Image (spheres, rainbow, N blue to C red):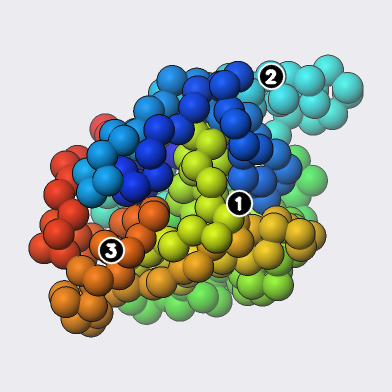
Amino acid sequence: MTVPARGFSLLRGRLGRVPALGRSTAPPVRAPGGPRSAFRGFRSSGVRHEAIIISGTEMAKHIQKEIKQGVESWISLGNRRPHLSIILVGDNPASKTYVRNKIRAASAVGICSELILKPKDVSQEELLDITDQLNMDPRVSGILVQLPLPDHVDERTICNGISPEKDVDGFHIINIGRLCLDQHSLIPATASAVWEIITRTGIQTFGKNVVVAGRSKNVGMPIAMLLHTDGEHERPGGDATVTIAHRYTPKEQLKIHTQLADIIIVAAGSLSVSQAGVQWHNHDPLQP
C-alpha cells in the first residue's frame, strides 16, 4: 500500500552492471514476501568508486499498478474494499504533506481512506479511545497515526495501542519483535521501500558489505534487520554483512566503512556522506 520513497538508496559502483529484466545471470534476492523480478532498465555506473542514486519514482508506478490489480481482484472475490484510517494531530506542515500523499496513493490503488483530524492539545486518552474504536471496527483494514506527536503524548503508547494486524506503519512492539525474529510482520514503510528497490533492481545482497547510515528505530534499524538476516528464515533476509553508522561515527571510520561497502543506504538527515568520500546528489523526498 505504500510506495517506495525517493532518494533513500545509494549504491556503490563496485557492484558493476546490473542486468535488466530477462537478462539476469543470477537469481534476484528474495523479498520478505517472496521473490520479485528485477526492475527493467536499471543500470549501474560500472565505475569502481562512482556512486549513483536509484530513484523510486518509476518503480513506484509499477508497484501502484500491481497493488491496484490486487485490490480489484480481492474485491471481485466478494471481499470488502480495503479501508485506511489516518489520525493527524496538530498542523505540522510536513505531516500534512505526508498524509496528503498517503491519501493520494491510497486512492490511486483503489483503497478507501479517512482522515481523522485532532488539535495539537488532544489528550493521550482521547487518542487511545480513537484507536480502540478503529481496532474494533470491521470496516477498517489499516490504521496509521502520523508522527511526530505532541510532546505530551507518548508515541510508543499510541503505536502500541493499534492492533498489530492493522498497524500499517509496523511500529507496534509485536511487529518490531517479529521483524527482529525473522518472522512475517508488517514492516515499516521506508525499510520496505528500500528493500523493494534493492530487490526489484536485481542487486545481490548475499555476502555483500552494506553500510546503513542512520540508526532510527523506524528506518535505519529495520533496514539493517532486513538486510543482515538469514535468507532461509520464515521472513527471508538479505544475508549481508551490515554496518550501522550514525552521527557519532568518527568521519575517518565512516570513510573506511563506505570505501569497503558494496551498498550504502542513507537513512539519516544529518550524516554527511559526501565528507566520507562518496559524492552524490540529493533532493527533498517530500512532494506537495
- Sequence order check: which comes first, mark 3 or mark 2? 2
Q: Is residue 18 depicted above or below 157 in this figure?
A: above
Comparing labels 3 and 2, the label whose residue is closer to the camera = 3
List x then y, in percent, for residue 18: 45, 32
State how far apart marks 1 and 2 are (Cα).
20 Å
Instruction: Name the element at disc 1.
Output: loop
Q: Residue at x 16, y 64 (%)?
A: 276
- Three-letter code, disc 2: Gln
For residue 36, what is the image quadrant? top right
Residue of label 3: 258
Comparing labels 1 and 2, the label whose residue is closer to the camera = 2
Instruction: Name the element at disc 2.
Output: helix
Residue of label 1: 168
Q: Residue at x 45, y 78 (%)?
A: 154
Disc number at residue 69?
A: 2
In the image: residue 117, left or right of residue 234:
left
State how far apart marks 3 and 2 are (Cα).
40 Å
Quadrant housing the N terminus? top right
- Sequence order check: which comes first, mark 3 or mark 1? 1
Label 3 neighbourhood size at 10 Å, few (<14), some (14-19), many (20+)? many
Instruction: Name the element at disc 3.
Output: helix
Q: Is residue 74 depicted above or below 250 in this figure?
A: above
List x then y, in percent, for residue 249: 24, 79
